[in-house]
Image (cartoon, helix red, strand yellow):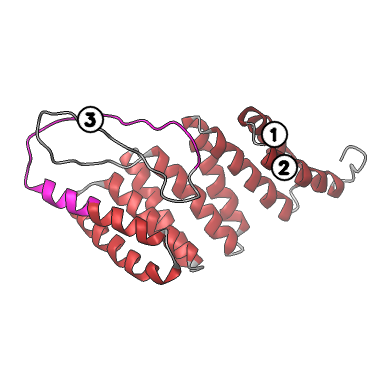
Amino acid sequence: PEPVFIAAASSGVYRFEIKVVDDLAFSQFYRIHYRQTRSRIPDDDDRLLAQQITSEAKKLSSQSHPEFPTALAQFQHALEIWRRLGDRASEAAVLSHIGTVYHMTQNYSQALAFHLQARTAAKSAGAAWTEGESSNNAGLDAWRLGDFTNAIEYLGQCLTVWTELGHRYGQAAALSNLGILYRETGEYQKARSAYTKALPILSALGDTAHKAFIYSNLGVVMHSMGEDRRA
């Protein structure tokens, strides 16, 4: 979740709409937490500007590769404003977005650096969702870099956050990725444990495609353990 700042008249009827901006979003319930109404202060102009720049950068980063440099420049501009305002939660969100852009351009070292910064900022701000996302993304970055040890550590941290938040889809995805990493490192018992924990979650979610993928990988693990008959 990211904070949204709106400058408007103190009375009136307002409607909020949430629109899917890319194919990576999944159907779920969204909540808007109404925090406060107050008089406008000088910093609000900067907050609204940073929010606008961040929104534009997110749109650019969801488009084609040639737009990435512009998106990065805008994210950096927004980051400077959020840091000046001392808004750690928004800073964490922008750091995570920057890391994702670098991941999409296959600059995994830079992606990892920004996702780890995002995780630290999110944790200090109590922004659990951003902490979970940045931990997950850091794990994927480390995985791409061939650093399986840290990938397992970061994805394990991600799993802890998603479990605390009750984010079932995130739990299943983290367990699935951990299963693959444990299999790659020859830790077959841990791989089997991760896969078997993911299966009931996916059943509850009705995700048959991912469930079939898990069963396939579980069969490979059990074959590696010499348990062909059960596989």
Q: Foreground residue, 213 or 81?
A: 213
Give the SS element for disc 1: helix
Whether residue 2 is in magenta: the answer is no
Mark earlier in primary sequence (3, 2): 3
Contact, CB < 8 Å: mark 2 with mark 1? yes
Give the SS element for disc 3: loop
Left or right of 113 on screen, residue 57? left
Give the SS element for disc 2: helix
Q: Foreground residue, 56 or 213?
A: 56
Query: In which quadrant of the rendered image does the N terminus lie?
Result: top left
Look at the picture and state if 61 lies above or below 4.
below
Count of numbered tags: 3
Residue 2 on image: x %, y %: 32, 42
Q: Foreground residue, 222 or 41?
A: 41
How busy is the neighbourhood of tag 3: few (under 14 within 10 Å), some, or many (20 plus)? few
- At 56% from the left edge and 37% from the top edge, which residue is drawn? 169
Q: Residue at label 2? A: 214
- At 66% from the left edge and 36% from the top edge, which residue is drawn? 198
Mark earlier in primary sequence (3, 1): 3
Mark earlier in primary sequence (2, 1): 1
In the rendered structure, find residue 35 and report the number of the disc placed on it.
3
How busy is the neighbourhood of tag 2: few (under 14 within 10 Å), some, or many (20 plus)? many
Q: Residue at label 1? A: 199
Q: Identify the magenta region.
A: 26-51
